[in-house]
Every structure is written in structure tokens, then in C-alpha cells.
């Protein structure tokens, strides 16, 4: 009898000794390990207007009022071209108009007299027709000379080159005394207000912009909260990108600055370092009834956070999961 008791005790101790040891792990509630998903794309601050101001008439540069870096307002004088030749053309046009007006006045008086004499038959029908024709021709000439006068006046105005918008002079091509031809660049002007942020968004991420809880432009020295103006509904075939335009809602980044357009998804994501691969699947280990349970995460990618619903009542294993397998016995520390 004693022998039987000793034998049973020996089997019991042996069975307990052969059971696998529980693997120590640490856990956290799912809500405590979720992070905000961060997506980004290259971006640049682009001026709303950047123009190379050119001469519209041929003339010599008489005066230059600005230089590189100068801030100007719309209508400010940039460059003054020599007006001499264009003023002479205007004077000639004015003189032609005045002379034609005088001739027309005289022809009209002669026509009126002819019409008075017509009733008493002191003038022939041919003479009356000739005087009527003279008046019609002079009216047409007057109209032509008035158009020439307006053209000459407009050409004279073009010798004064002004800023078309508020901005900063980024380059000066004109030199004092230089003969400018039509279309010759004078200065380059960049608008510094209402700048936009342009970014090329990978097409598979473009739809995530509408879900963003916040967006910002991150440069080397600062960050600027931004708002989306427009996402172009066209995909560039070769690069699979969509153009997006943003505006800084706070602060004013400098035109030409580059950086990253970063947007954060309103949903929560599981950090990439908690995602584990088992049997060719990516997933996460959770603690359940003192066992490790591997839960696959469809759509997960290695090295990237994965969007996940925060309503699961999971105790996520954060420490000691490196050698775990699904169903392993664990002890939570």
C-alpha cells in the first residue's frame, strides 16, 4: 500500500514537471497603445503669381526705380522708358485729328449751304452729292485719326512700367540706358501674399485627406497648420500621383520653401513595432485566459502602422512577445 502511494506521488510530480513553463509577458489595454496615423508627402510653397515683367514698346531705359529684394505695391513704378519718340507720335496723331476736325467743319458748312441753294436750283445735284461725299469721307478720316491718337496715347503709357500686383522683386534684367525691345524682360516679380502649398499625393493615399483630423506643412525650421483647397481629380499616369493645393491657416511660410505636407488620420492606428509576423500573416498578440492569442490584421504592412477599431477589449502583449506562438501559456507581470 505504501508502495502504491509513493508511486502515484512520483507520477504526479513527474507530470507537473513536464508541463511547459508560462512565458512572462507585460500587457496594456488596446486604447493605451493606439497612436495617431501620420502620412506625408513632399510639398513646396508656391507663389500665387510670379511674373517676368517685359517691355511692351521699343525704347531706351530712362530710369529704374527698384532692385532685387524690394517690396512693391500694385501700381508702383518699376521702370521708366524714354518717352521722346512715343510723345512725338502722339503729338502727330493729335495734330492729324485737329486738322481733320477743321476740314470736316468747313465741309459741313458747305454742305449746309448747298442744301439751302437746292430749293432755288442754284446748285446742281452733282455738286450737292460731291459736298455730301466730302463730309462722309472726312468723318471717316476723323474716326481713323482718333483711333490713331488713342493708339499713340496707349503706346506712350506703356513706357511707364508698373507693378501688376503686390510682391517682391526677385530679379532685375533691365539696365540703365539699355534699348529694350518688345517682349524684353525688365524685372521679375513674385507675389508674397496668398501663397499656396502644392504637394503630390500618392493616389492610394489621396482619399485619406478627407479623413484627416489635422494637416500641417513641416519645414526645416517650423511647422504651419494648413487647410486643403483642392485635390485634383486626375491621376498622373506614370507617377500615380494627384496634385493637391493647400493654404497655411496660421503663419506665412516663405515662397519657395520646401518640406513635408503631413496629415493625421482621425481614426486610431496600431504602432508598427507591435505588429508581429506568424505563419506568413501579420497580426498582434493579446492575452486571453493566461494564453497568448494571435489575431491576424488584414491589410497590415510591415514597418507601417495599421488602422484598427478602438472598441476591442484587448489586452495587447507589449513585452515578451518575441518568442510567442499562438496558444502559448503566459504569465502577465
Image (spheres, rainbow, N blue to C red):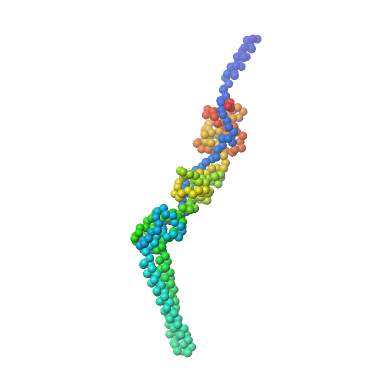
How far across and how far down the image is residue 32, in percent? 58, 35
The picture quadrant where one finds residue 76 is bottom left
Q: Nearer the viewer, residue 115 or 18?
A: 115
Q: Which of 104 and 265 is in front in this view?
A: 104
The picture quadrant where one finds residue 143 is bottom left
Of all residues, the one furthest to the top in this rendering is: 2
Specify whether residue 236 is in view. Answer: no
- The residue positioned 48% from the left and 88% from the top of the image is 119
Of all residues, the one furthest to the right in this rendering is: 1
Q: Nearer the viewer, residue 272 or 175?
A: 175
- The residue positioned 52% from the left and 51% from the top of the image is 229
- The residue positioned 56% from the left and 35% from the top of the image is 33
Q: Which of 140 and 7 is in front in this view?
A: 140
How far across and how far down the image is residue 281, in percent? 53, 34
How far across and how far down the image is residue 295, in percent? 57, 33
The picture quadrant where one finds residue 269 is top right
Q: How many labels does the image show?
A: 0
In-image side of 268 versus 141 (left or right):
right
Q: Quadrant of the C terminus?
A: top right
Q: Image height check: is 254 above or below 286?
A: below
Q: In which quarter of the image is the N terminus?
A: top right
In-image side of 226 versus 131 (left or right):
right
Specify whether residue 62 is in view. Answer: yes
How far across and how far down the image is residue 270, in percent? 55, 36
Amino acid at each position: 500500500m505504501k508502495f502504491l502511494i509513493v508511486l502515484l506521488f512520483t507520477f504526479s510530480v513527474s507530470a507537473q514537471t513536464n508541463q511547459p513553463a508560462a512565458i512572462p509577458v507585460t500587457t496594456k489595454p488596446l486604447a493605451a497603445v493606439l497612436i495617431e496615423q501620420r502620412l506625408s508627402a513632399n510639398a513646396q510653397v508656391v507663389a500665387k503669381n510670379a511674373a517676368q515683367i517685359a517691355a511692351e514698346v521699343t525704347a531706351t531705359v530712362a530710369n529704374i526705380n527698384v532692385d532685387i529684394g524690394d517690396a512693391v505695391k500694385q501700381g508702383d513704378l518699376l521702370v521708366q522708358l524714354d518717352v521722346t519718340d512715343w510723345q512725338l507720335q502722339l503729338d502727330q496723331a493729335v495734330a492729324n485729328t485737329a486738322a481733320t476736325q477743321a476740314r470736316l467743319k468747313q465741309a459741313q458748312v458747305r454742305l449746309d449751304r448747298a442744301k439751302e441753294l437746292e430749293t432755288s436750283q442754284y446748285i446742281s445735284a452733282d455738286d450737292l452729292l460731291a459736298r455730301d461725299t466730302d463730309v462722309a469721307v472726312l468723318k471717316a478720316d476723323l474716326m481713323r485719326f482718333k483711333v490713331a491718337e488713342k493708339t499713340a496715347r496707349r503706346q506712350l503709357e506703356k513706357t511707364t512700367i508698373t507693378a501688376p500686383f503686390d510682391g517682391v522683386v526677385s530679379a532685375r534684367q533691365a539696365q540703365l540706358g539699355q534699348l529694350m525691345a518688345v517682349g524684353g524682360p525688365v524685372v521679375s516679380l513674385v507675389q508674397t501674399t496668398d501663397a499656396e502649398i502644392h504637394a503630390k499625393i500618392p493616389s492610394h493615399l489621396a482619399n485619406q485627406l478627407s479623413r484627416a483630423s489635422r494637416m500641417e506643412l513641416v519645414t526645416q525650421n517650423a511647422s504651419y497648420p494648413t487647410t486643403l483647397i483642392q485635390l485634383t481629380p486626375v491621376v498622373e499616369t506614370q507617377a500615380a500621383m494627384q496634385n493637391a493645393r493647400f493654404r497655411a491657416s496660421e503663419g506665412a511660410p516663405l515662397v519657395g520653401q520646401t518640406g513635408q505636407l503631413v496629415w493625421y488620420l482621425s481614426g486610431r492606428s496600431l504602432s508598427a513595432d507591435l505588429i508581429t509576423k506568424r505563419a506568413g500573416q501579420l497580426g498582434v498578440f493579446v492575452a486571453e485566459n493566461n494564453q497568448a492569442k494571435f489575431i491576424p490584421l488584414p491589410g497590415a504592412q510591415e514597418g507601417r502602422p495599421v488602422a484598427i477599431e478602438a472598441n476591442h477589449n484587448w489586452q495587447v502583449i507589449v513585452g515578451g512577445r518575441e518568442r510567442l506562438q499562438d496558444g502559448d501559456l503566459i504569465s502577465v507581470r
